[in-house]
């Protein structure tokens, strides 16, 4: 259930003064593989749910911001391949994961998909510029994708 996924996520959080006051955005969030497993199960059970898509789009932004490449591929990949979800947030997170893994061709393919439907999408354009410059992703490359 969604309640179970939220409970698993909540249980994984490690609250501290550092996280609360000094750590910005996604870096203050602990990721729970168990919660992601439950969310993936729910997405498969309810592939037409707009709410599930919104939850996953937000989760994708967090995975990208935390540079969780393995988790992004493991959990976001099936949303695209099995469920056919092509949401911008999910696609951008997978493009960033591909860039992190130095799979420039895959990153560009995913970015082209986003830009075909949203030609001025800032995060896609920023990542494309980084790929074109050959500079790669900076340590804080997740900044500016809308999920600070």
Image (tube, rainbow, N blue to C red):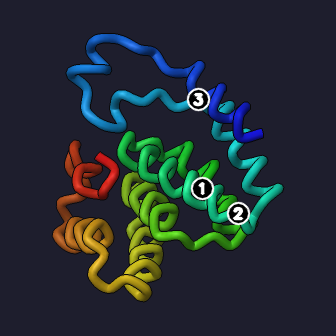
Rendered location of residue 99, percent (x, y):
38, 60
Question: Looking at the picture, does residue 88 appear above or below residue 10?
Answer: below
Q: Of the two numbered discs 3 and 2 on the same chain, state the one appearing first in sequence.
A: 3
Q: Residue 118 shows which numbered tag?
A: none
Q: Residue 76 shows which numbered tag?
A: 1
Question: For the point 30% across and 20% down, which residue is it?
Answer: 20
Which residue position holds label 2?
A: 49
Quarter the N terminus occupies = top right
Q: Of the two numbered discs 1 and 2 on the same chain, state the one appearing first in sequence.
A: 2
Which residue position holds label 3?
A: 9
Rendered location of residue 44, percent (x, y):
78, 57
Q: Is residue 58 left or right of residue 138?
A: right
Furthest residue toward top: 16
Please tell me in which quadrant of the rendered image residue 36 appears: top right
Please tell me in which quadrant of the rendered image residue 102 appears: bottom left
Rendered location of residue 112, percent (x, y):
41, 82
Q: Quick one: SS at disc 1? A: helix
Question: For the point 45% across and 15% down, which residue is it?
Answer: 14
């Amino acid at each position: 259930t969604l309640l179970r996924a939220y409970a698993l996520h909540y249980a994984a959080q490690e609250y501290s003064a550092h996280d609360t006051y000094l750590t910005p955005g996604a870096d203050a969030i602990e990721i729970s593989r168990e919660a992601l497993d439950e969310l993936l199960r729910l997405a498969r059970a309810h592939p037409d749910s707009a709410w599930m898509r919104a939850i996953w789009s937000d989760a994708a932004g967090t995975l990208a911001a935390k540079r969780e490449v393995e988790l992004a591929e493991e959990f976001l990949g099936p949303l695209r391949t099995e469920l056919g979800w092509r949401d911008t947030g999910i696609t951008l997170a997978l493009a960033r994961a591909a860039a992190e893994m130095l799979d420039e061709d895959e990153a560009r393919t995913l970015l082209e998909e986003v830009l075909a439907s949203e030609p001025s999408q800032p995060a896609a354009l920023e990542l494309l510029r980084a790929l074109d410059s050959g500079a790669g992703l900076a340590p804080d490359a997740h900044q500016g994708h809308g999920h600070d």
